Image (cartoon, rainbow, N blue to C red):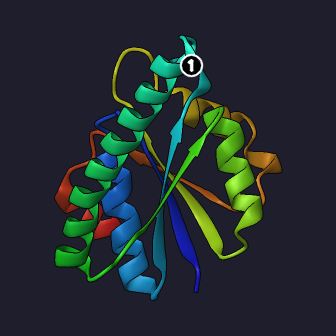
Amino acid sequence: MRKFLVILDNTTECLNAMRFAALRAAHTGGGVVILAVIPPEEFNHWIGVANIMREEARERFEEHFKIFSKLMQEEEGITPELEIREGKPETEIVDFIQDNPDIGVLVLGAGTGKDGPGPLVTHFLRNSGTMPIPITIVPGAMSKQALFSVA
């Protein structure tokens, strides 16, 4: 089964990417994998504090996943999988794709702020020619109705 990989982070545009991935998976008989990456720079403290911060980040991702999972199940009949990794997001995403041959598409949400589409979108657009799978960029400002019409 082909799976859509979506990145769970602290951005608002990831909601559109989640919706799009769930819709595409439902329409194509695929699945959704949600990947959350805890960056290493969040833990430049003493070991005890770092461990607490790491666990808090993991708990936040798990709570967000529960919300997205419930929405995907109720609205699209899709039960997503969650994977949490630690490291540099760009590296962890590529490694995850290489480790999981059932991942068929990387779905990213593009930010709408003055800083551009976001670091992940910028990175993967620059390196799209070397990616082993297609990348879908979902505009953060796209309405729910527009997502339904194109997915």
Residue 93 picture location, percent across and down: 64, 48
Q: Is residue 143 left or right of residue 35?
A: left
Residue 146 picture location, percent across and down: 24, 58
Of the pair 31 and 149, the residue shown nearer to us: 31
Residue 66 vertical placement versus 58 (above, below): below
Q: Kindly indicate the quadrant of the structure image that contains residue 55.
A: top left
Q: Residue sitting at 45 percent across and 18 percent down?
A: 49
Of the pair 60 and 145, the residue shown nearer to us: 60
Q: Is residue 31 left or right of residue 103?
A: left
Q: Residue sitting at 47 percent across and 32 percent down?
A: 54
Of the pair 70 and 26, the residue shown nearer to us: 70
Image quarter where the C terminus lies is bottom left
Task: Name the residue that disc number 1 marks.
Answer: 47
Number of marks in picture = 1
Residue 143 picture location, percent across and down: 20, 50
Residue 148 vertical placement versus 56 (above, below): below
Residue 96 visible in the shown view: yes
Q: Kindly indicate the quadrant of the structure image that contains residue 58.
A: top left
